[in-house]
Image: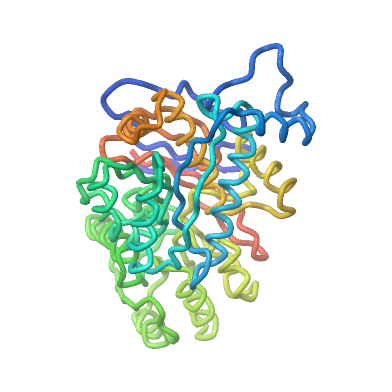
Amino acid sequence: MMKKRLAVGLAAVMMMGLTACSGGGTAGGTSAPASAASQQSQEEKTEGEKTEAEKTEASEELDGEIKFGVSCAITGNFPLAGQRTKEGIDLALEQINANGGVLGKKLVYVAEDDQNTQTTAVNVVTRLLNEDVCAVIGPHTSGNAAATSDLYKNAGIPFMTGGSSPKLATLDNPYFFRVRPSDTINGQVAARYAVDTLGAKKIGISYNNNDFGTGGRDVIIPILEADGIEYVAVGHNAGDKDLTGQMMQLKSAGVDCIISWTDDAEVALTARQLYELGLDVPVIASAGVVMDQVLNLLEPEYVEGWYAVTDFVSTNDDDTVKQFVEDFKAKYGYAPELYASTYYSAAYVLADAIERAGSTEPQAVRDALAETKDMKLPEGLFSCDEGGNMVHGCVIAQIKDKIPGMVDYVTVE
């Protein structure tokens, strides 16, 4: 059964079966931007009352450093994603260190450019694991996370990824932590929204043949089959420059709704070619379509009215999101998007885990990450389950004039 509510003024997070890992420890419901580590005493000034000079001085006075690694796409076909990743982490660390750091030390990171390729990601992670790091954030994409998983497992060092493919759950890696909702959730929401809210009777599924795209496809199709909904599924490859054949197949089949589950470049191409072919039906896309690196490639009319299943939109009225957006804009001059939110939140979760562990020893940090519970951050409510999944909700956004805004949030029971 699906429940739908207007999202204006409501929280963005869709909670689905939040279950903490066994072990029982909690993060105490810590919220950003108050640091999860080394909270200020009652006598000290609050973060909002500090001047920039006082924040810098507080950070410089910390005794020593705690280092983690970051693998992100600073160059390659995904550079804006890497930039936003670093911006989110930088903002989080600025706040954390201004509030006493972690275990009385300054939290810092060393970043490597994985270029969003599996070969480079393997090389980058190998280098990071030779650093004195207690954990690593990244790589982001599902394929790169899968390619590097055994490196982390063999080294006994925890890693946090935004890769959303359900296939990552089969890695059998106790050092794997997912800091975005799995497409087990996102794909289910897309299918249910298409059928229950949009009333679709024959759905076209356009998917990428990589781990991400097929992972979403394999969640969506069983739901449609269980409901007796007709569908036509067409695949494409990352890097394809022409999807006319696939889009014509959907048009000829007479679909009345399309679910697009693909990467940034291909979703932009899908949007342009659907518009050029005059296939005017509702489209529900995966999260990439609401991000700047996609929207900046498109004319407004290409995606006007499109829906997206995503975990973050900067127009959300949730108080935690609003504070994050305000802080991000003050630092960078523009609104954050998904990557900034994801890895800002991941940095806070990691800082909280190190503080609760009372140690930078990777196994202790891993165990504390596994006990994360009810930690409210811009990306959602973080509670770790037995598979390392930390975020269990998402929202539906709709694009108007290339600005994503919330339409509904849904709870699936």
Q: At x 22% / y 51%, what residue is drawn?
A: 171
Viewer-nearest residue: 177 or 111: 111
Quadrant in the rendering for residue 362: top left
Of residue 181 and residue 37, the one placed in the foreground of this image is: 37
Q: Position of residue 390 (x, y in %)?
A: 38, 39
Classify residue 151 as left or right of residue 368.
left
Q: Position of residue 190 (x, y in %)?
A: 40, 56
Q: How are the residues colored?
A: rainbow
* Foreground of the two, 339 or 249: 339
Residue located 42% across and 30% down the image: 353
Q: How many marks?
A: 0
Please give left or right for residue 147 compared with residue 206 in the image.
left
Name above or below for residue 73 compared with residue 392: below
Q: Nearer the viewer, residue 288 or 234?
A: 288
Estimate the x, y position of residue 86 in percent, counting from the top left.
Answer: 56, 53
Q: What residue is drawn where x is 74% and y is 53%?
A: 333
Q: Which quadrant is the C terminus positioned in?
A: top left
Query: Seen in the image, is 158 located left or right of residue 51?
Result: left
Q: Residue at x 46, y 35 (%)?
A: 349
Q: Quadrant of the N terminus?
A: top left
**In the depicted structure, whether residue 259 falls above or below residue 390:** below
Where residue 318 appears, as percent x and y from the top left, is 61, 37
